[in-house]
Image (cartoon, rainbow, N blue to C red):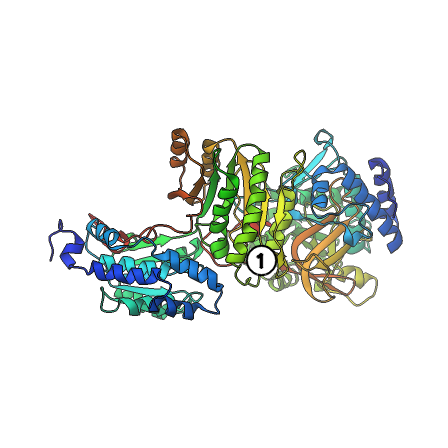
Amino acid sequence: MDISVSNADELDKRIRYFIELPSANNVSFQRLALELFAHQYACNPGYRLYCDRFGQTPESVHGWLDVPAIPTSAFGLTRLACFPAEHTQVTFLSSGTTGAQGARSRHELTSTALYDASLLAHFRACVMPDKTSIQMLFLAPSFAQAPQSSLSYMLSKLSQTLGTKRDAFLIRDDKLDFESAAGMLRTVAEPVAVIGTAFAFVHFFERCEKEGLRVKLPRGSRVVETGGFKGRSREVSGERLYRWFSDILGIPRVFCVSEYGMCELGSQWYDANLADYFAEREARVGTKIGPHWTRIAVVDPVTGKPVREGRQGLLQVFDLSNRGSVAAVLTADVARIVSGGFELIGRFAGAPPKGCSIAIDALLEHGAR
Amino acid sequence: MAPDSMPVADSLDLPVRRIAECAAEWRDPSSPVRAQARSALAGGRWPAPVVERALDNVLFDLDEATARAMTQALSGRPVSTLVILPGNIIGPAVSSAFCAALAGSPVILKAASDERHLAPIVSAQLDGVAGAVSAQHWRGGETEPEAEALDQVERVIAFGSDETLDALRSRIKARLKSGIPHFVPYGDSYSVGYVNAGAELNEAAAAAARDVCLFDQRGCMSPQTVYVRGDAGRATLFARALAAALEREGRALPRAALEEAEPALIASFLRRCAVTALDAVPHGLSTLLTGPAKSGVPEFVVVVEPDGAPRCAGFGRVVVVKPCADAGTMQRHLAAFGRPLETIGTAGGLAPEERSALEASPARRHCELGEMQRPPFGYRPTVQDFCEAEGA
């Protein structure tokens, strides 16, 4: 296929248009994906080097699945951007390091236009298919409080665009404002969206149990849990967390959605159950679905080739909204393809062979927000 | 009781000569003990040539004169000891038993599941020769046999990961009457190579390949990163020589069968190397070299990266090569890295200032490249580890 190297602004416009389409077919996705790869190969020196090492160029690649997927950890090892550093407007950093040799991932953007279009469109589809706005309570810091966090950016953007004046960020200066949270939850009269990291929810619910707080949020209220535990010490099972949503907030399972995203990617994936519920389909609990400007594959961790449907492997993503960095990303998350989406199994936890030599680099695959 | 000033060897009238004769049997490939060891280890994780090389190395320098000198240098009384052996390499069971024998210390060798053959062999060999060497095995996590063993000893010498040793330390804290000072841990560490300006690159590469291939870099004495004095071009030339040497050495010392997670980890590391490898321009030589595929992943990986902190794979015959200005620069990187540094293997004569720079590094041992996997007898554990320290 003859793919010319598109101008960045022109490509941004076309991707933006593609995102705003209600849906898109594979042919147009494929064409745009190959154009994007040609652009990134030409303009992103770190990525080009990576592709060259595997002998992959725009001439040799014929589909999005052939585009070399860079590991998420690479965002912490080298600069991956299609523009000079002085054009960077926003930099998202992952939440922390994972070892002595680990570096925080950096995702640089010249503009948030594509990022915004992507996050808003898919959030609407998966979390607010029935509403144009909703009061949002965030168990997370605002972007002003965490100016390098992609999650905080996303939540602030959601609040500005789809929220209300009564929205609140309930983590300030790294502390959960339990009293404010409890007060708001006791008094809300309209449906509310409670959005936060799994870790923050655990803290909140443990305090609720201690204080004996239980509420029944108005019908139509919902929960979005994001971020997982990222190896934090107070990990609890997903089952327990969802029981808390029901027991303490009075939110039924079908109105609870888990988000999957990372600082290296412009798009997010959400559990399908809420969208299914409002579309009057059978609710797919635990199945994550992505927007039409992304594709996913589950690949063998050794060969990088897709595994058979239903088998576990590493999740690989192609995200058109990552125009300014790298669209094809290999995550360190284990998943399997299920009906129309994927099921997240957990982190790639390859225990190194037993030995007394320090073996840490291999464990540094990360994609933390 | 012998006076404190009297050397332990004299006071206990140890049969040093007989111990040295037993050591010589381990060096002799045609001896019955070697045949027994060879047979016991056959079909295990390590290919036969690796087993032979490891057995050649284990007591290579323990002759009678060395043994006598070591016993005469000991201080303090011998203490009954439990040695928790590692399973990742071959040899610590034998060296530990001989250290205990020379110290006159009654010892229990607790073998690892992955290498449980040599402990009973060396125990039987030394039976009636020196002290009491008993071999035991229990699975990790079985606390009852461990508690029984702890009740019989005054000291514990343990090999393993830091995590394992921390767990063990907490378990024995309450049991050892003499407390933690009698816990001697040998935990995680790493080693590096240094190729000096005067080194002939092919010779240095052949030596480094020997150190890499024995035990597939699972031991703490394998070079994980090799610093090459000079510019990126010289480092790349060394990397090419090393790749060729690894291919040759790999025929003599084949890689062990991969563990379940190993292919995925090597593939993951290789992807990272594709990001971190130096750009090949302008010299045009590849800076990421891989061996022939075996079990789905390359038999070895050599990557040239920019000067900086060491990188450790810890398995898989993955070697990182870095150019560096001089030994002082390397020493600063190693000091900043902060993890326990085991050995620096060097190639090429060292000027006095280079030697001082290396000696200022936090390495426990310095040796020539090619000798990294062959520490002298009594290095780890030491014979003194089996005696009560002076003043204790």
- A285 in relation to B383, above or below: below
| Residue B379 or residue A360, whichever sits in front | B379
Which quarter of the picture shows residue B127? bottom left
In the rendered structure, the answer to whether residue B31 lies left or right of residue A234 reads left
- Where residue A162 appears, as percent x and y from the top left, is 78, 46
Which residue is located at x 86 percent, y 37 percent? A10
User: What is the chain identity of the residue bearing mark 1?
Assistant: A
- Where residue A242 appears, as percent x and y from the top left, is 64, 62
| Residue A21 or residue B293, whichever sits in front | B293
Q: Which residue is mark 1?
A: A349
| Residue B58 or residue A135, whichever sits in front | B58
Disc 1 crowd rating (10 Å Cα; few below 14, some 14-19, many 20+) is some
- B364 in relation to B148, above or below: above
- B112 in relation to B186, above or below: below
Q: Amino acid at mark 1?
A: Ala
Element type at marker 1? loop
In the rendered structure, the answer to whether residue A332 lies left or right of residue B36 reads right
Q: Is residue A90 visible?
A: yes
Q: Is residue B171 visible?
A: no
- Where residue A345 appears, as percent x and y from the top left, is 65, 61
- B212 in relation to A285, above or below: above
Q: Please identify the quadrant where the N terminus of chain B is shown.
A: bottom left
In the rendered structure, the answer to whether residue B62 lies left or right of residue B228 reads left
